[in-house]
Amino acid sequence: MIAYKTAIIDIGSNTVRLVIYQYEQRTGLKEIENVKAVARLRSFIDETGMLAEEGIMRLENILRSFREILEDYNIEYVRAIATASIRQAKNGQRILMRMKQAVDVDIELLSETQEAFYGYYAVVHTTSTPSGVTIDMGGGSTELTYFDEKEIMQSISLPFGSVSLKQQFVSGEIMNEQERQRVYDFARAQFEAIEWLKNLQLPVIGIGGSARNMATYDQHRKNYPLSGVHQYRITREDFIDIANKLTSLSLSQLQKLDGLSSDRADIIGPVIEVFHALMDVVGAQKFQFSRKGLREGLVIHRILKQHPHAFDRYDVFSTTAKFLCAEFGKDDGQIKHHEYLAKMLYQQLADLNFMDAQPQNMRYLSDAAKVYFIGEYIDKDAASQHTFYILSNRAIDGLNHKERLRLALLASYKNKDNFKRYVSPFTAWYSPDELKTYQELGSILKFTYALDATKRNVVRKMRLFDKGDFVEMHIYTNSNSLAEQYRSNRQTKHLERVVKKPIHLHFIEEEG
């Protein structure tokens, strides 16, 4: 398969970024380079509305550096886009022409509608959240969208951002208490004027660097045991606590905080108050973070034009699982067979009242079977450990952090001791009943994986019979199953803990 590389140059009001992505049909979309330059272009717009020469030269120098970087990559497609800082500058069009002449970069000026749409587009294709309100707050503008069941319903761009609010409301390096209240009141008034925002009772999803900084700070202060901020969530109470803490610190204290980017320390205060005001107007009880925004939306949109089935916004995890399996060498036919066997065994255990029949458990089994023991790609003997580490420590589109950990626990299941060790830092995340269920589902996955020991799809079906003192399992095969018999007999003990009685296996080879 050919790997396509795409470069996005994103000229914002606060930062200018060069991000290079690689897409391959089997393994999906990956970010392979990310270079940021702090430009603060919005601060160079003078009282006449013109972007001053100092700001223009800063942009030109950054783009010249980016061109040198791009020469070292074999890039199939480069797209440079500009947003609020250039859009709001009266000399914006002349700046675009000058960049073309000086550094040979064609810059596309995105409209407010486009900027909001691409942020929404990234969120719905990389998170499982069905409905919500997105906010992407740049240096000079703030984009909002409301989506319901993954479909965009409303969008708007407001002409204020972190840098412009700091210029308008903050007299010193950071906000004092009175300035904090004024920023909140200003933002709330702006949001209350938008009828479709009021009392939606949906999560607010923050996109961009400032939202990401809040998430990383919260993780540092809690000594959070998982990595990544994509799809990380905080409660309303935690949000207020973070807001009170961060807005009480001096600039030097903010710059030293773990998890908070030093170049955003002076603008984090206005950002927090805007997020706070939006949550109050929407009636949101959760603030969620998306690491994927405008740039990813542009790339995903382009990929879907060329490959219409590359991403599924309505079942995001299935797309991600497909890419993960390809990356770690899992065969699609074997995955489907394992999933088929696991679901069949669960249903029969439920029919005999050894487990509660829950549709969500069927989904958990299905998801975990897709990526079960992917760590074998690294080392067969340590497949469980590698599987748990991979799945718990990388962002998985379509799963929030709690769901990601559940997947890691199920897909890495080897025995109850390993399970207890893996879950020990997270026991507060789940109830005892949930943990019991996950261990039972893991046992099913472990046993049915043994039923395909030779990866030949030998086992066709199975039937369970409750004989009172023991359970008899008839396993029907289509050819010699010596390896499957050996492996499954060794794993029967896991299922015996579920049914609480001995299990006798009978392998029956059928003709045809």
Image (cartoon, rainbow, N blue to C red):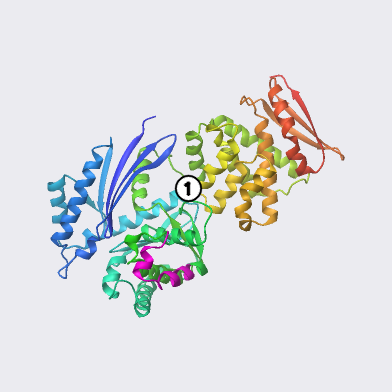
Q: Nearer the viewer, residue 101 or 244?
A: 244
Where does residue 102 sit, x and y in percent of width and height? 13, 48
Indicate whether residue 244 is drawn in magenta.
Answer: yes
- Asked which secondary structure carries label 1, the reply is loop
Question: What's the residue type where badge 1 is placed?
Answer: Ala
**Residue 92 visible within the image:** no
Q: Look at 38% across and 66% down and name the residue there.
A: 254
Front one among 455 and 299: 455
Residue 258 falls left or right of residue 140: right
Check disc 1 and report the residue beneath it.
Answer: 395
Note whether 204 is above or below 407 in the view shown: below
Report the magenta residues as a range: 239-258
For the point 31% across and 55% down, the residue is: 114
Query: Disc count in the image?
Result: 1
Q: Residue extending furthest bottom?
A: 178
Image location of residue 55, percent across then percent down: 18, 59
Helix, strand or loop for the magenta stretch, by majority: helix
Q: Is residue 500 left or right of residue 69?
A: right
Q: Can residue 395 be seen in the rendering of this structure?
A: yes
